[in-house]
Image: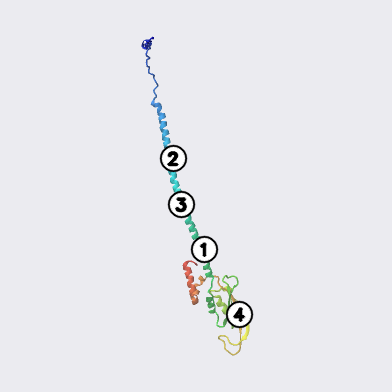
Amino acid sequence: MYGIDINFLNDRADRPVEAIVPVDRPKVSMAGKTPLLVGAVLAIAACGGVGGYWFILQNHQKTLTAQSASLDGQLGELQQKLAQVDTLRQQTQAIETEIQGLASVFERIRPWSVIVRDIQGRIPTRAQISSLVQDAGSGESTAGGLTLIGKACSFEDINDFLLTLKTSPFLAAQSVQITAATLGEKVPGYCPGGVDNGEPIELVDYTITGDIKSIPATALLDELNRQQEATGLAARIRTLQATGAIQ
């Protein structure tokens, strides 16, 4: 067998060692990077500012939402209270209307017993009333009127009665008039102040009409107080005046 002895070292060709030559690279100037850095910082700051502003807006929105909900609740309560106030106002107006209605009706009521007593106090001694009727009157008075029918000793006695009725605080003077006056049949007896000679007398039948005054009963307080029967009525009128129901 043959042995092959190979010497790699002897066969290696000598090669010159290449020198490592440093490569000159251009230096980057920081001055050139400054705008970039500033831009990056500003961008980051801008992003941070936007994020912070967004966070503030979110908190502000939540606050406003909470305030809006609170105000809505308060508004609902106020609307309920306003509705209650409106209901109470309507009820009060209804009551005031009823009071005014009752007061006006009360004012239109004329104390009939007081009117009769007043007329009785005005009858001349030589006249008498056989009938006193309340009626519609002439239509010019909302309080109505009255008709007196009776007998008198003479026409002069009827005229005297007419004049005294015109001064009544309960009657409209211009409406009081004699609507009928005629001589009646002779009757036995004699007139007051006359002489009883046993002969029948001839009386005058008369009819007097007039309107009751269309004025509030409050305007007749003095006369009502003067009449003993009307004391209670006068007191009730003054009570209504004190409460403001009537003026």
69 to the left or right of 194: left
Q: Secondary structure at mark 3?
A: helix
Q: Is residue 71 left or right of residue 211?
A: left
Front one among 22 and 16: 16
Name the kind of residue labelled 4 in the image: Tyr
Q: Tell me the mark number nearer the camera, choosing from 1 and 4.
A: 1
Residue drawn at 52 percent across, 68 percent down: 102
Determine which residue is flagged by label 4: 206
Task: Measure how far apart labels 4 and 2 are at the Cα level.
Answer: 106 Å
Where, quadrant-wise, is the N terminus in this rendering? top left
* Residue located at (57% from left, 79% from top): 161
Q: Secondary structure at mark 4?
A: strand
Query: Residue at horizontal 47%, vertical 67%?
Result: 243
Q: Which mark is residue 73?
A: 3
Where residue 176 appears, x then y in whole percent? 58, 75
Locate residue 209 relative to residue 68 in the image: left or right.
Answer: right
Which mark is first along the chain, 4 or 3? Answer: 3
Report the disc number at residue 30: none
Mark 1, residue position: 94
Q: Which mark is residue 54?
A: 2
